[in-house]
Amino acid sequence: MNNMSTNNRTTRLNFLILFTVFIFSGCDTGTPSFPNTQYTYYKDTKNIIDTNCSTCHSKGNPAVEGTKGDFSLEEYRDVLAKRSAMVYSIETGSMPLGFPLSVNDKAIMLDWLNGGAPEGNPGDFVKSLDYFADALPVFYESCISCHGQGNALPSLIDYPAVSNYLSLLPNKNAFNNLLSGFSQDMNHGALMVTQASLDTLSQWVVDGVAEGSKPFYEMPIKGILADNCTTSCHNPNASQGVDDLTNYAVLYEKLYVDTAGETVVNTVTYQIQNNHMDGQGASLTIWDKATIEYWINDGPPVPVSDPGPTPANIAYNNGIKPIIDKYCVGCHVPNNFHNTNGRKPLASYQQLTNLGGRTRDASIQVIYDRVFNGSMPNVNATYPFSDDPYTQSYYDKRTLLDWINMGAPEN
């Protein structure tokens, strides 16, 4: 009898151990023993994730760091833990925001994620190049003085022009052959193209001609100006005759118009191109110069006039919903799988005032705190709020905060 009881207990214990092993073998606790994909993280997908995802999904980003839905994708273990959510987001197109993955990148990501997401060898990782981070300075320094607009040569003035030109070539080898000929025959006058520059362009094409993150004022233009211009000289405490470029309206005026309102050669570009500020405490790199000029040529937003005090009758259905829709709903949308990991839908007044079961007042306080401290929408969003007067986003932010201070009425 005792032996039978002992045997039964042993059998049940063995069954529980086997059952536990079986259950936990399906959890996202590590790379499966038998991955079913030719791709690996370091060799194939890290560059795709770094370019398209981790600029927002990073531990240093207050929009995701420390929240219930912490969604950092900077390291392999982060990606591995989130791979089910990533499959859903990629398949539905809800991520990346604003710039969907290319057909090729989407196929690679889904094959890798569904095939077990193997890590591979860290030594296989080679950083993929993109236009704005790597190729733009080369085109700026060595190409666009001839391949600009208004002549018979192919235009290489911006990413669409370069991408269109490359699409007309039969294959990548044709571009590399062109670069080889360039290095031998096309160093005109002061334009001495280094081999390192040619190698950068060649590698960028091999990597897939990725565009990267387009420059806008909040990032990185404002930072470039702070590092080289506004902190040391062009600020509200500047001496007489020195422009305050921390004021967006003044900056914009120096980009496009003179005091009479007539279009002129923009002052900032002229100063940059002719190196007038070098030696004045500024040390703009080629990347700084190329990025600022690209932003200027792309058309920065026109400053707007102060609309005056927020109306006393402001309400969600009378002025606030368009602001929420523009700045928030792109991420905080209903039926978006990512919302279950922290981003609550904000497509209606009811959703706005019921964040994760919070009371109306507590929900509104969360919105106020995150908008006020700048963590929402984050600086990488399609439409970030600005703290610079004369920009529409500055006044939209002020209106939203005023509405909350007035009690956040619905009607």
Image: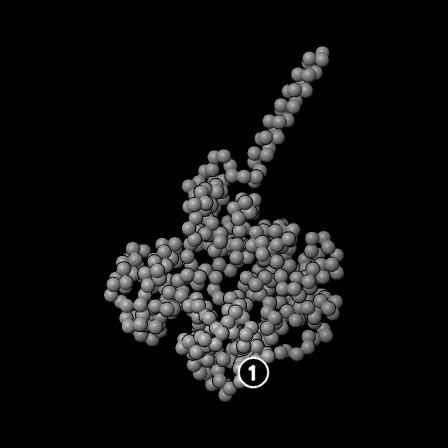
Relative horizontal placement of residue 177, taking residue 37 as reference (left or right): left
Disc 1 marks which amino acid? Ser
Q: Secondary structure at mark 1?
A: loop
> Where is mark 1, residue-wise?
239
Q: Which residue is drawn at the image coordinates 51% and 50% (left, top)?
A: 90
What x and y, as percent, mark residue 23? 60, 33
**Depicted 25 relative to depicted 250: above or below:** above
**Depicted 6 relative to depicted 113: above or below:** above
What x and y, as percent, mark residue 308? 66, 79
Residue 335, can we see it?
A: no
Q: Quadrant of the C terminus?
A: bottom right
Q: Which residue is drawn at the image coordinates 48% and 59% (left, top)?
A: 99
Relative horizontal placement of residue 134, taking residue 392 as reference (left or right): left
Q: Residue furthest left?
A: 185
Q: Which residue is drawn at the image coordinates 45% and 83% (left, top)?
A: 263
Residue density around tag 1, few if under 14, some if 14–19, many if 20 or more, within 10 Å: few
What x and y, as percent, mark residue 168? 31, 61
- Residue 385, by quadrant, is bottom right
